[in-house]
Amino acid sequence: MTITNRRVIFEKRPEGWVSEDCFRVEDAPVPELGDGDVLVRNIYMSVDPYMRGRMNDEKSYTAGFALGKVMQCGAVGEIAESRNPKFEAGQIVTGMLNWETHTVVPGGAGIVRIDPALAPLPYFLGILGMPGFTAWYGLLKIGEPKAGETVYVSAASGAVGQVVGQIAKLKGCRVVGSAGDDAKCKWCVEGCGFDACFNYKTVDSVEDALKQHCPHGIDIYFENVGGRMLDAVLTRLNPFSRIALCGMISQYNLKQPEGIHNVRSLLVNKVKLQGFIISDHFDLQPEFMRDVGGWLKDGKLTYRVDVADGIDNAPKAFIGMLKGENFGKQVVKLGDDPYQA
Ligand SMILES: NC(=O)c1ccc[n+]([C@@H]2O[C@H](COP(=O)([O-])OP(=O)(O)OC[C@H]3O[C@@H](n4cnc5c(N)ncnc54)[C@H](OP(=O)(O)O)[C@@H]3O)[C@@H](O)[C@H]2O)c1
């Protein structure tokens, strides 16, 4: 049987905001497998903020996407065909695959088997995947939370933020979040157990909201947003506080980044500010899986995913996520999920 692969090609570099004409969706035949190759039928693909950086033609921590080629992404799929003794048809795998319905993986390199009994498949792109690992690492290894401390996390209901807040609660912290929507804030408090969460788009001033919700100051800031949010947080930091600089999504689509004014706070409060890229820390993945996999199994963590339907909607889902239209971890469903409840 001939299989058609539907895929998304990186068509045009964005200047400022990404638009749908940066992408082209097309059909292509699936090439013949060579010895050692594996064909994966992708079931879910992830859209992530870092992809915006890879659309630029500039030096960064990882290579940019090549124009005219299919884009890469984390995905979960089922082995459709294998010419590799390590994989069998029907097994579920995850790894860096592509924005497409079917990926040929040369030599089976870079994919790993996962146990679908552990969690719903989209979780392997979220809480049990890169975003969950990022949350765990940034909070525990950089933030080093102690019971009673105040943790503030921006983009709190997102793929990373919701995990940060819940782990911080498990560590006995007071947890405050912010998000760009009242329903997201409500869910952070009622669904994830945050002590408070405010809508940064509707409060009169983020500085005042932080004063109100962090009356004893901020000991750990898990930074997802950057720009004016970071400037406001700098006014509220405690001595010896820590900033895990995970991301700066408010800046990714700007032609000119915003300036930060309150930098003196880092000096007078003797703050530790550390940026990190999670791909540098794969050696810690077993520890992460033990912790977060264990908490999830014990019912101590919850996770929210937002599923868009079909490869044709992947560009829209990606752009929507950058604008805050996602509620939870944004994934795109590409094909039948045999484990969906
Ligand atoms: N360092 C690493 O290795 C690493 C790994 C993964 C992710 N990250 C970073 O972590 C951050 C969160 O990523 P994620 O995957 O969890 O995404 P996400 O939070 O699921 O989705 C992005 C969210 O960012 C918020 N946002 C967008 N524009 C904003 C703005 N101008 N101001 C404030 N919030 C804005 C939106 O939520 P609202 O509705 O709340 O505005 C949107 O839903 C990103 O900065 C990302 O680059 C870093």
Image (cartoon, rainbow, N blue to C red):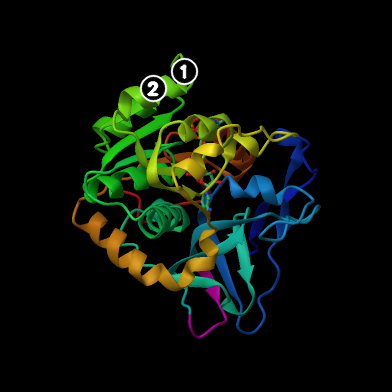
Q: Position of residue 226 (x, y in %)?
A: 56, 37
**Amino acid type of the residue that numbered disc 1 sits on in the rendered structure:** Ser
Q: Residue at x 21, y 50 (%)?
A: 300
Determine whether label 1 and label 2 are within 8 Å by CB. yes
Helix, strand or loop at mark 2: helix
Q: Is residue 337 visible from the viewing direction of this image?
A: no
Q: Position of residue 327 (x, y in %)?
A: 43, 34
User: Residue 83 colored magenta?
Assistant: yes
Q: Against 179, is 317 above or below?
A: below
User: Residue 248 colored magenta?
Assistant: no
Q: Which class describes the residues within 10 Å of circle 2: few (<14), some (14-19), or many (20+)?
A: some
Q: Residue at x 26, y 49 (%)?
A: 301
- Label placed on residue 307: none
Residue 216 vs residue 121: left or right?
A: left
Q: Position of residue 259 (x, y in %)?
A: 66, 33
Residue 58 vs residue 73: left or right?
A: right
Q: Residue furthest left?
A: 298
Instruction: State the residue position of label 1.
Output: 205
Q: Residue furthest top?
A: 204
Pick the quarter of the image with the N terminus. Answer: bottom right
Residue 280 vs residue 312: left or right?
A: left
Q: Which residues are magenta?
A: 79-86
Q: CA distance from mark 1 to mark 2?
A: 6 Å
- Residue nearest the viewer, comparing 325 with 182: 182
Q: Is residue 204 visible from the viewing direction of this image?
A: yes
- Label placed on residue 209: 2
